[in-house]
Amino acid sequence: MSETNTEPSPRARSSGPVTIGGLARASAKRKEIRSVANSRLKNIREKMQDLERMERVLAQLAHYCERANSLNPCPIIAALSEG
């Protein structure tokens, strides 16, 4: 026979009775955490959009460089030599 642990889990243990104020504070904390997480998620999505735009532009420039000739120089090299 195996022994079963009758000790309550740390989550089940309570440091006292649950109060309305305690629930309200916990709820406010969750809202704050969700707000921070959503803000960071928005920031990450904006960065991803920026990177996707940069990727498209760089891919287009690389494509133009592959077809560069003496009349149409590589736009990357042209931009660097102007800067």
Image (spheres, rainbow, N blue to C red):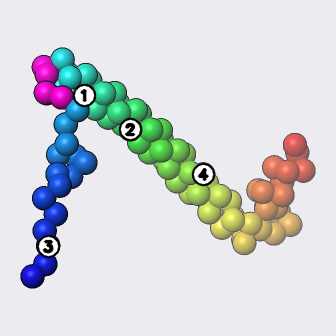
Whichever of callouts 3 and 2 sits on the residue coming sooner in the sequence is 3
Which element is circle 4 on? helix
Which element is circle 3 on? loop
Instruction: Characterize the magenta stretch by its predominant secondary structure.
Output: loop
Image depth: mark 2 or mark 1 in front = 1
Which residue lies under the disc numbered 1?
26
Which residue lies under the disc numbered 4?
54
Drawn side of residue 35 relative to residue 45, left or right: left
Image depth: mark 4 or mark 3 in front = 3
Magenta residues (range): 16-20
8 or 19: which is nearer to us? 8
> Label 3 vs label 1: CA separation?
35 Å
Relative to 4, residue 57 above or below? above
Which element is circle 1 on? helix
Whichever of callouts 4 and 1 sits on the residue coming sooner in the sequence is 1
Drawn side of residue 12 relative to residue 37, left or right: left
Drawn side of residue 34 relative to residue 58, left or right: left
Q: Do the residues bearing badges 3 and 1 touch, measured as CB atoms within 8 Å?
A: no
- Disc 3 marks which amino acid? Glu
